[in-house]
Image (cartoon, rainbow, N blue to C red):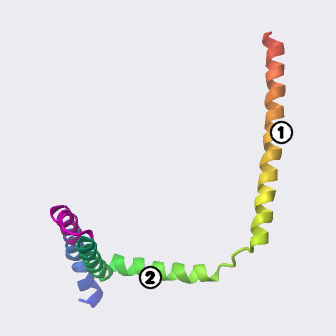
Amino acid sequence: MSSENIASKYDGLKWLMVALIVAAGVYGNSVFSSESLLYRVVALLILAALALAIALKTEKGHSAWSLIKGARTEIRKVVWPTRQETVQTTLIVVAFVLVVALILWGLDSFLGWLVSLVIG
């Protein structure tokens, strides 16, 4: 049996542990609602880090992390438009929307006039 099969065999148990940690965080936050907000936030951050660390050890968690890293790499490759290009494109879109709105208003007025002639 390879190590991948053994790792994926325990994935269900790991996800159960993650769910139990999240449930413990929710329950603990409500039970200790009278405690300082700082202490509760610190405890929730520690539990979230623990749950995330366990989730990343699963097959799906590892593939999700790989996807996130790949997405960050692709975002760095994007060539973002300059401010001038953004303003020009926005103005073109606004102008086009106004022209189409005027055409539709004219068509609606004409069809309304035509219908009123027919029905009377």
Q: Locate the N terminus by quadrant.
A: bottom left
| Residue sitting at x 79%, y 30% | 108
Extent of the magenta region: 21-37
Is 32 magenta? The answer is yes
Quadrant of res 23: bottom left
The verdict on residue 66 being magenta is: no
**On the rendered structure, is 84 left or right of 26?**
right
Residue 24 in the image: x percent, y percent?
Answer: 18, 68
Amino acid under disc 1: Ile
Taking the view exactly as shown, the residue that stands out farthest to the bottom is: 2
Which residue bears the numbered disc 2? 66
Q: Which residue is mark 1?
A: 103
Q: Is residue 75 above or below residue 88?
A: below
> Could you tell me which quadrant the C terminus lies in?
top right
Nearer-the-camera pick, 11 or 4:
11
Given the image, on which type of amino acid does mark 2 rest? Ser
Residue 70 position within the rendered picture, expressed as x and y whole percent measured from the top left: 51, 82
Magenta region, main secondary structure: helix
Q: How much space separates mark 1 and mark 2, taking CA atoms? A: 49 Å
Residue at left 29%, top 76%?
A: 45
Q: Residue at x 23, y 79 (%)?
A: 9
Does residue 46 appear to the left or right of 77 in the view shown? Answer: left
> What secondary structure is found at the residue carrying circle 2?
helix
- Compared to residue 54, the image places residue 20 above or below, namely above
Tally of marks: 2
Q: Residues within 10 Å of mark 1 (few under 14, many from 20)?
A: few
- What is the number of the mark on residue 61? none
